[in-house]
Amino acid sequence: QTVVTKRNEKKKKKTPYVPESDNDDNNSNDNKSEDEVLLIELNTDWQKKYFGKSKCALFPRTSEEVSEILRYCHENHIAVCPQGGNTGLVGGAVPVFDEVILSLKRMNSVLSIDDITGVCVCEAGVVLEELDDALMRRGMCVPLDLGAKGKCQIGGNVSTNAGGLRLVKYGSLRGTVLGLEVVLADGTVLSSLLRENRKDNTGYDLKQLFIGAEGTLGIVTKVAILASRAPEARIVTIFACDTFRKVVHLMVEVKKRLAENLSAVEFFDHESLKLTVDTLPGAKDPFPYADDLKTNIQFYVAVETTVNEKAMESRLRANVLNFARSVCVLAEDGRKSRGKFVSILQKKFRGDEAERNKPNLAQRFVISENEKHANELWNLRERISVALKYAGAVYKYDVSLPTIKMYELVERMRERFAERRMDDKVKVLGYGHLGDGNLHLNISRKEGPCKDTLAMIEPFVYEYVTEHKGSVSAEHGLGAMKVQELWRGKDAEEVRLMQRVKNMFDPRGILNPHKMIPSSSPPLPSK
Ligand code: FAD
Ligand code: MLT
Ligand code: ZN
């Protein structure tokens, strides 16, 4: 197989989606050795919420080295914490105690790209954005996109079964990952799972067990993934809506009428936009029109559409504009050449029948004029989590709920804080993957974490989600944060079966202990 990228090849510098000033406590590291500083970094998660105490981090370069490490750890009952880009949001990639950190960052080669089948084989430590760049050079792209792309690794994505912003278009990694190489707890290298066939109905699909296993069943060392054709043009539209019901109906219309060009349909509320604009330099309100024109805008729907051929861009633009005008009360916001957003058309109803009968699902919309503008608009959604990180302590919940009722959880949460007169201390934000029924509920507290705030949120959120037949983790996984919630989210029999699977693959419990799979029995119901 051809090695497409060489290890240690000098990489071009990317615009950091995850700011590089992340290490904001560098000053306190002044008197520490380089190794000590590195260990602190590896023991600390992206949110700086979870801290391990490991004194040992290993950086294997090959599957054989991973195998040797695991064989040794297995024989000596030493616990191991696999780590990819360490962008996980549930404390899964840092040790709970002093587990050996096994970082995949040096296994970062793209091994082959098949122009005929579109199958790409790479090592697990390739950074998602770098994998995408390698594919882009061949007119293809990774069928996954998320805000952490500049840092997360494909092995970490597979191990969390990351969803991201384009699941609406590409589906889940469970469909696009065709094969894996995995090193088991005792050091066995399972290379036979690294298949490249699109179709294979021979026996159990064992690779699926490792997708979303959060490093508890084996170390993913290689990935075969089905790439997609890279789009040549992209248009981002943001709609402003006054009720969540309209948001949902707008999403249904978007899916129906922009179907073949649709690559993402996301939403965020006004609280999310405000926090992002107030926190991140360069983030601008897309609807900064004069107050007298302001309608009661509470929500924003971000729609990304693409075409495979540049020549089709103008037709796509016409379709999107036509659609947007047919569902909006007011015509679009444009912007002047100086880069300032202004309302260019303020006409309300033309008075014709089509206008009178249109559903008015949105108040306004803004459509991207070029790629730079598309990025600016898209960042308003994609970078909310980055804004939250810099706005204070954040309590993060990532849930699946019936789409139409999804936002009620945000409202209930606000009411709870208001009832206890705690609402001036917190901001409750709702955003997420609208097209997938995935809500991100975030509670931001500028003054830092506090027990009373947490007590207002948990277990209420988990109970609410279970009662509404949702999922307590739609895409981020369980990690250390929600390990006990598996009992709530699943039937006890199902959890016990998972415990047996874990025991079969890792009888000594060395792989990522205290994460994902609870070791004890279900908690007794509270009285
Ligand atoms: P890590 O954080 O290093 O690890 C995650 C888990 O996988 C851990 O349990 C770790 O032990 C295990 N693991 C890592 N590599 C391996 C391996 N090779 N073999 C076995 N186990 C391994 N997530 C989403 O689903 N959707 C989003 O839209 C999204 N957006 C994000 C935006 C931002 C700004 C940030 C910071 C995070 C976001 N995330 C999102 C969460 C996170 O980026 C994903 O979970 C991502 O897939 C983690 O990849 P990673 O390489 O950083 O893994
Ligand atoms: C997102 O969709 O932005 C990510 O999952 C991160 C987050 O939940 O904040
Ligand atoms: Zn998400």
Image (cartoon, grey):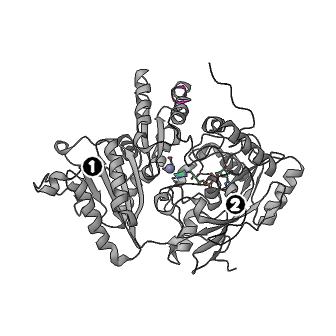
Quadrant, the N terminus: bottom right
Q: Which amino acid type is shown beneath numbered disc 2? A: Lys
47 to the left or right of 208: left
Q: Give the extent of the magenta segment.
A: 454-458
Q: Which amino acid type is shown beneath numbered disc 1? A: Leu
**Mark identifier at residue 361:** 1
Q: How many marks can you see?
A: 2
When asked about the image quadrant of residue 68, the answer is bottom right
| Disc 1 element | loop
Residue 376 seen by the camera = no
> Image height check: is 447 above or below 249?
above
Dot 1 alpha-carbon crowd within 10 angstroms: few under 14, some 14 to 19, many 20 or more: many
In front of the other: 10 or 98: 98
Looking at the magenta stretch, what is its main secondary structure? Answer: helix
Q: CA distance from mark 2 to mark 1?
A: 43 Å
Q: Which residue is mark 2?
A: 207
